[in-house]
Amino acid sequence: MSPSLAETIELMGRQARAAAYRLAQLGSAQKNAILQAMASALREATPELLAANALDMAAASDSQQAAGGPPAKVLSAAMLDRLRLDESRIEAMAAGIEQVATLADPVGQVIESWQRPNGLCIEQVRVPIGSIGIIYESRPNVTADAAVLCFKAGNATILRGGSEAIHSNRAIATALQAGGAAAGLPEHAIQLIPFTERESVTVLAGMDRWLDLIIPRGGKGLIETVVAHARMPVIKHYDGICHLFIDAAADPAMAVALTVDSKTQKCGVCNALETLLVHRDIAANCLPGIAAALRAKGVELRGCAATRAVLTDIAAATEADWRTEYLELILSIKIVDSLDEAIAHINEYGSHHTDSIVTADEASAERFLRGVDSACVFHNVSTRFADGGEFGFGAEIGISTDKLHARGPMGLRELTSYQYRVRGTGQTKGHES
């Protein structure tokens, strides 16, 4: 490992810690003005962002080996789509920043307050976490989303994006830093690691002296690497192996609509459907219609033996399929004998992200909602609604599959901690009876 890589990232950590202390002093109005300036700077930098993204897209699309260099990393069509920027996506990023400026600032909110018999007045108050490392892959818009959400909650951020988006990420970070600085953004409040070497991840994960939290967003390999090396708390945004269970009491038309939407509305995202479970009592009647609707959208189907007895022309699903986040137009289907079997399958093979039941039976729905151990559990709702914006948070930094300190869509509130503020009139412990 190059000493300059470790030394550079260590310096960034020290700078982030100092910036976090300054950020904690900013008021809501000042933070909002800085966010507005960032949005304007991003729009003004559209030509630079498009040019940088074109470099990333060309590298990701080129399967030819550069002279004397390593083979290029070739991405799937879904991943290429996540990488691509155009004017509308840049505008969406800028509009998203402006939306964050309109959100209520959680910093300083009093969670609870009370007075003790000795006259002490105690408040539990939301405060920034401090300095946060964000490690992510592919989508360059995460650079803006993560930076501005952390900033609004008063946190300094060190960003480490994927090598496939390095030019785009640098251009976005530069625009945010320049626009924010002109409006009073503390220096080093938003930093982007310039290195693409994998060692930069392990160095960042070991900086517990400077970072209070690290959030990895990406594939299982990335998250496992961060967890193995992190010396500070980690909030994981693990796989989205999401399920939809069609109960015996499901409305057939609703079952078709929710399956198709959950799988095809956008397949390359973490809340897209990957495994469909169908109650045996309804399978023969509903599966052909579901299969026809999915095939019309170009979905490849794989099924268990019972499913293939109904849909005779589909491929066999393997054990690995039940544990796979496809992020493509592929769906595995399993027929189950009962609600309990569906719950057991989800808890065994799912990633504890988002799972939904389609049923008109309220009692079955409640059993499902209580029995499935996932961050988001839905009744008669597409899995695509597992999203901070759809929950009314305005924006999210991701969807946590952990149980501590945040679970599910993470908005501004989940990017804060709290402290106790105690006010008195000179009380001393020694004078208590």
Image (spheres, rainbow, N blue to C red):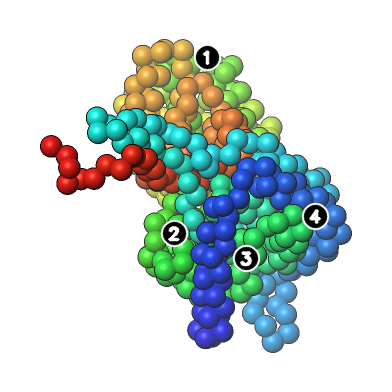
Say which label, 3 or 4, has the lower sequence index: 4
Q: Nearer the viewer, residue 85 or 192?
A: 192
Give the amino acid type for the residue marked by disc 4 in the picture.
Ala
Residue at horizontal 47%, vertical 26%? 378
Q: Measure the alpha-carbon separation of dots 2 and 3.
A: 16 Å
Say which label, 2 or 3, has the lower sequence index: 3
Give the amino acid type for the residue marked by disc 1 in the picture.
Asp
Contact between labelled residues 1 and 4, with CB atoms less than 8 Å apart: no
What residue is disc 1 on?
251
Q: Measure the alpha-carbon separation of dots 3 and 4.
A: 17 Å
What residue is disc 2 on?
212
Q: Nearer the viewer, residue 25 or 166?
A: 25
Of marks 1 and 2, the one in the foreground: 2
What secondary structure is found at the residue carrying circle 3? Answer: loop
Give the amino acid type for the residue marked by disc 3 in the picture.
His
Q: Residues within 10 Å of mark 1 (few under 14, many from 20)?
A: some
Give the amino acid type for the residue marked by disc 2 in the picture.
Asp
What residue is disc 3 on?
188
Q: Measure the alpha-carbon separation of dots 1 and 2.
A: 48 Å
Residue at horizontal 68%, vertical 36%? 102
Say which label, 4 or 2, has the lower sequence index: 4
Residue at horizontal 17%, vertical 39%? 432
Say which label, 3 or 1, has the lower sequence index: 3
